[in-house]
Amino acid sequence: MTEPLLHAEHLRKRFDGGILAVDDVSLTVRPGETVGIVGESGCGKSTTAKLLLRLLRPDAGTVRFAGHDLGALRGRELRALRAQLQLVPQHPQSAFNPRMSIGDSIAFNLQVHGTGRGPARARARDLLERVGVPGAHAAKRPHELSGGQLQRAAIARAIATEPRLVVCDEAVSALDKSVQAQVLNLLDELQRETGVAFLFISHDLAVVEHVSDRVVVMYLGRVVEEGPARELWETPAHPYTSALLSATPDRMADRVRLTGEPPSPGNPPSGCCFRTRCPVALDACAGERPPLVTHAPGRTAACVRLDALPAGDDRPLVAAGR
């Protein structure tokens, strides 16, 4: 099996007020792979992304990228590695400097890593053309581009340094369906051409299913299930995954409706963090926190009901419908 490009272990992050946004999260991304992260708003997806990019420091845990411990790097070593680890943000309107042209913003990413100003500007125009934005738009300011063009420009900036991994944090959520499809096709083309890996964070399950090789499901800051995208979609093992999938358009007839509100990250329930909303919860769910266990090849889930399944049986604990 290919060695991980990115490997995070036991990440934790608590914010002021006692909010435990990320609680013991571990994940890997291999070269050329797309890993999706899904879950409701507030489940810790974006905070996890910031920890992986070292935009935030974890309270505990480690992140290794290309064999390097990101937490131990400083100065030039960290800057050099950042060229290989880039971000496509959710809101490109706020990610670009409104006083700089689009071309200069892209060129700046290259200049930081040693490219001269002239070559960097020429490269910026070429990158815009590559992602489907006219090179002449390099002279325009962010507000002069459409939403789709600006998102493509954000992708151009992210790939300028020829990274090995790009984190897409809700990168297509604000786009209409036709533009969304164009951007997703662009990402697929870039991956086939360059071998770049993607960590794709989204609340849109249909998009994640389409683009991902593997999927990580998060709830209240914790990973509750992980596995190959197609297998997880067809036979979800965790009741929360089943509930998420049942809300997609092609499964609405068999929707699993959750009751109650998600618990506060500052005061999570004992045992399984999902038990207060779970339609198949047992008394045992209030006991110890269930660990992530392997229940089928390449698949893990955190649920006490997995003990009731025969070894190797990856049937869903709650039917997701079709």
Image (tube, grey):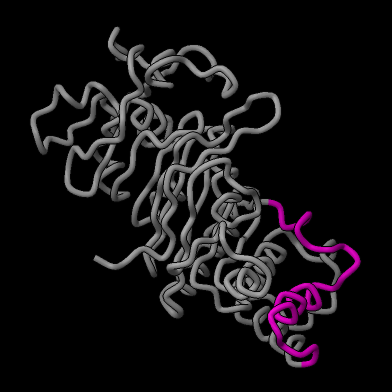
Q: Position of residue 271 (x, y in %)?
A: 38, 18
Name of the residue lying farthest toward the left: 310
Name of the residue lying farthest toward the top: 283
Asked whether the viewer can see residue 54, the reply is yes
Which residue sits at x=59%, y=43%? 47
**Is 92 positioned to the left or the right of 73 in the image?**
right
* 44 lies above or below 143: above
Q: Position of residue 131 (x, y in %)?
A: 61, 75
Quadrant in which the N terminus is drawn: bottom left
**Is 318 positioned to the left or the right of 17 in the image?**
left
Asked whether the viewer can see residue 211, the reply is no
Q: Is residue 127 magenta?
A: no
Quadrant in which the C terminus is drawn: top left
Q: In which quarter of the view is residue 108 placed?
A: bottom right
**Is 293 positioned to the left or the right of 161 in the image?**
left
Q: Position of residue 305 (x, y in %)?
A: 22, 21
Between residue 224 and residue 9, name the one nearer to us.
9
**Badge count:** 0
Which residue sits at x=47%, y=15%? 269
Q: Position of residue 281 (x, y in %)?
A: 32, 13
Q: Is residue 93 magenta?
A: yes
* 235 lies above or below 92: above
**Is 137 positioned to the left or the right of 191 in the image?**
right
Q: Which residues are magenta?
A: 91-118
Which residue sits at x=43%, y=46%? 206
* 138 lies above or below 89: below
Which residue sits at x=53%, y=20%? 262
